[in-house]
Image (cartoon, coloured by chain):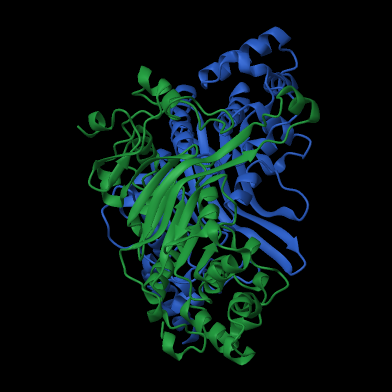
Chain colours: A green, B blue
């Protein structure tokens, strides 16, 4: 993006931005949602309110300039992690450090300013756009909040340039349209444009292409990667689709029932997966080749309830390799190969 | 109609009345479903695949209606039946599994009652005990313990609910099961197990399955033959091997290249330009022509016929019909002369 031409371009050189340094550091993050129960039940429980442990002790770092994938099945807590990282939810405990700043230490005004540096793109673009705002207004809105020093004319110019950058051409033709007047793929482009208008450094993309038509997905992914280069972005890419993750992520974390079971460089995790759950997930992805047949058996059952998760390793009731220790002791996330962390008692055996 | 064809759809057209005018959601579509096969029907949202699935049971109401074509099921002309006779076919001979089992099952009825009610409706002579026994045997075959029959749908997981839906179709020994995005609401591991189950049932019960999905991977995994729809028209039909190894229609070619494959190393995904058109104002001629990399003059003018391009492999594309097209224009010239 030709940033110097834009009125709102912020001089990024005053920020010490080094590719490869840690942009996001998440430490032992937890989010427990209390379960609503009746008055009588709360009396009987004597003040102990059961909780859904959506995120239960998650730690990882995201380096500046990388695409960090967070994958798991529905109910694994991956979306909650995305929101916690942006402090859209207050964590129960643990911390999120963004560019060296502990987000929890910020006042609400400081946090508000910080938000111009971090954005989110959700799965459903129609639900993300106000039906009564024109596309131009929607994209301009964050700029109004975060860049009050610019004139409306400057902002309009900037919105048009960003519309052009995300491939909505000619941008003038789209500025005054409403979300229902454009197609689903175009809507996701507009949502991306809105996220980019404040020149953020970090974007959480929560299943950004899951709603798009199959023939439109690859072009949206390509656009996201182009924008990453032009805007020097770092992505947290949340997805349930390991096949898609393969085409975009540099590193990936696999999540199961509120915990990480495996983290590492994408190729390393895919080729040398050392957690039985990761293996099952990779094996279960349907392959678009009729001559390919799955060989490994699938784990039993389905993802359990996060209110009373299984003891020890959360995956042990479904795990084909489970032994006694698995139900008694929770395996810690430990490094077994350079940059490759796994939470399984038998990771070494699996790698053999 | 030859004996190995269970369901034959001929030139089917289904229209929706909307304020903007009539929309043809299924436009002159012909399709054969062979006995004992899993036929995968793929297409993007809005291409008419679900409308086609419902039309096979004449399950359409409100603004939708079948405005043309023939439906031949197991030698019978379904269009000649009255709407009162259709319920005897639905459920009993053609079962249906939808995407969201929670909206298909009655939330205040136990699983057992779903099954026995279905059996009694179509076979009133069956005793309670016999119906119950059949239900128990069936769900156990599908991997659900018989004790769970007394539970309500909300007590079961998504994968189990979908197995209950299948058991409803099997309870009456339906000849054809139409499964519309049956695994879309399931997680990949549960999806993989459900697909394995479908294949087992196909072999064990000689079941014929029409699997409607947008997921190319799912089709590759289970389908014997594949039908590809685009903008209310049938684009291509062939065996799964042929369609995946040698796709004929440019839309199928682009679609297959744009799907991420976890088993392939690197490489870029193909990026198809444009988006599926609105059916309210479909493009002239071949509906894919504005997105087609091989577009020719004729493509925007005339609709290509859906014709065989190889043995058992049909496609509607002018690339393969050049010869006959030239012939027609030649004839016209003669006439003009």
Q: Nearer the viewer, residue B117 or A134?
A: A134
Residue A150 shown left or right of residue A311 in the figure: right
Query: Against B209, is B256 above or below?
Result: below
Q: Quadrant of residue A109?
A: bottom right
- Residue at 51% across, 49% down: A81
Q: Quadrant of residue B103?
A: top right
Residue B260 visible: no
**How many marks do you count on the picture?**
0
Residue A270 screen position, x and y as percent: 29, 45
Residue A328 shown left or right of residue B78 in the figure: left
- Residue at 36% across, 28% down: A297
Q: Nearer the viewer, residue A33 or A177?
A: A33
Q: Quadrant of residue A277?
A: top left
Q: Nearer the viewer, residue B190 or B276?
A: B190
Residue A58 screen position, x and y as percent: 45, 44
Residue B208 screen position, x and y as percent: 51, 33
Residue B332 shown left or right of residue B87 in the figure: left
Q: Which of A345 and B314 is in front in this view?
A: A345
Query: Against A146, is A67 above or below?
Result: above
Residue farthest toward the left in the current orientation of the protein: A352
Residue A59 visible: yes
Residue B319 screen position, x and y as percent: 37, 68
């Amino acid at each position: 993006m030709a940033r110097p031409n834009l009125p709102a371009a912020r001089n990024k050189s005053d920020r010490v931005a080094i590719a490869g340094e840690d942009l996001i550091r998440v430490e032992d993050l937890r989010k427990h949602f209390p379960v609503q129960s009746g008055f009588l039940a709360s009396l009987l429980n004597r003040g102990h309110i059961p909780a859904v442990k959506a995120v239960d002790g998650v730690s990882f770092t995201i380096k500046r300039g990388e695409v960090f994938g967070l994958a798991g099945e529905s109910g694994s807590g991956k979306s909650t992690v995305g929101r916690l990282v942006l402090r859209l939810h207050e964590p129960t405990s643990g911390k999120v450090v963004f560019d060296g700043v502990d987000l929890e230490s910020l006042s609400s005004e400081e946090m508000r300013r910080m938000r111009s540096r971090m954005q989110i793109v959700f799965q459903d673009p129609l639900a993300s756009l106000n039906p009564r705002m024109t596309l131009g207004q929607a994209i301009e809105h964050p700029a109004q909040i975060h860049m009050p020093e610019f004139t409306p004319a400057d902002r309009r110019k900037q919105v048009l340039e960003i519309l052009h950058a995300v491939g909505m051409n000619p941008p003038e033709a789209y500025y005054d349209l409403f979300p229902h007047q454009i197609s689903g793929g175009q809507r996701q482009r507009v949502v991306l444009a809105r996220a980019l208008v404040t020149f953020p450094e970090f974007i959480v993309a929560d299943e950004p292409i899951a709603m798009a038509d199959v023939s439109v997905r690859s072009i949206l992914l390509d656009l996201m990667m182009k924008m990453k280069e032009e805007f020097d972005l770092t992505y947290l890419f949340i997805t349930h689709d390991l096949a898609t993750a393969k085409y975009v992520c540099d590193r990936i974390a696999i999540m199961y029932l509120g915990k990480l079971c495996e983290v590492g460089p994408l190729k390393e995790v895919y080729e040398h997966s050392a957690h039985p759950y990761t293996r099952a997930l990779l094996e279960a992805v349907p392959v678009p080749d009729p001559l390919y047949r799955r060989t490994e058996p699938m784990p039993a059952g389905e993802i359990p309830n996060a209110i009373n998760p299984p003891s020890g390793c959360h995956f042990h009731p479904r795990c084909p390799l489970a032994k006694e220790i698995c139900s008694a002791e929770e395996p810690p996330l430990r490094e077994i190969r350079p940059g490759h962390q796994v939470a399984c008692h038998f990771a070494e055996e699996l790698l053999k | 109609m030859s004996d190995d064809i269970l369901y034959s759809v001929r030139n089917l057209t289904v229209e929706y009345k909307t304020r903007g005018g009539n929309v043809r959601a299924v436009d002159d579509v012909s399709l054969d479903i062979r006995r004992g096969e899993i036929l995968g029907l793929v297409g993007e949202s809005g291409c008419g695949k679900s409308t086609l699935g419902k039309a096979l049971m004449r399950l359409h109401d409100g603004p939708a209606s079948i405005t043309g074509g023939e439906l031949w099921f197991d030698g019978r002309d379904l269009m000649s039946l009255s709407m009162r006779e259709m319920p005897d076919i639905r459920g009993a001979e053609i079962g249906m599994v939808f995407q969201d089992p929670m909206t298909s099952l009655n939330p205040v009825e136990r699983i057992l009652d779903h099954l026995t009610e279905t059996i009694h409706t179509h076979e009133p002579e069956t005793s309670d005990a016999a119906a119950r026994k059949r239900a128990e045997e069936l769900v156990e075959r599908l991997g659900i313990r018989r004790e769970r029959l007394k539970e309500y749908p909300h007590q079961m997981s998504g994968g189990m609910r979908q197995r209950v839906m299948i058991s409803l179709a099997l309870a009456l020994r339906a000849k054809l099961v139409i499964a519309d995005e049956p695994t879309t609401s399931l997680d990949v591991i549960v999806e993989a197990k459900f697909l394995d189950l479908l294949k087992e049932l196909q072999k064990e019960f000689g079941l014929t399955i029409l699997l409607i999905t947008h997921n190319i991977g799912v089709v590759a995994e289970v389908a014997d033959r594949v039908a590809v729809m685009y903008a209310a028209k049938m684009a291509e039909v062939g065996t799964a091997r042929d369609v995946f190894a040698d796709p004929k229609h440019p839309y199928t070619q682009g679609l297959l290249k744009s799907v991420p494959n976890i088993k392939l190393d690197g490489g870029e995904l193909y990026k198809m330009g444009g988006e599926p058109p609105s059916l309210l104002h479909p493009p002239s001629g071949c509906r894919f022509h504005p997105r087609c990399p091989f577009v020719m003059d004729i493509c925007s003018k005339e609709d290509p016929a859906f014709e065989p391009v190889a043995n058992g492999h049909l496609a509607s594309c002018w690339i393969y019909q050049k010869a006959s097209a030239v012939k027609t224009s030649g004839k016209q010239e003669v006439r003009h002369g």
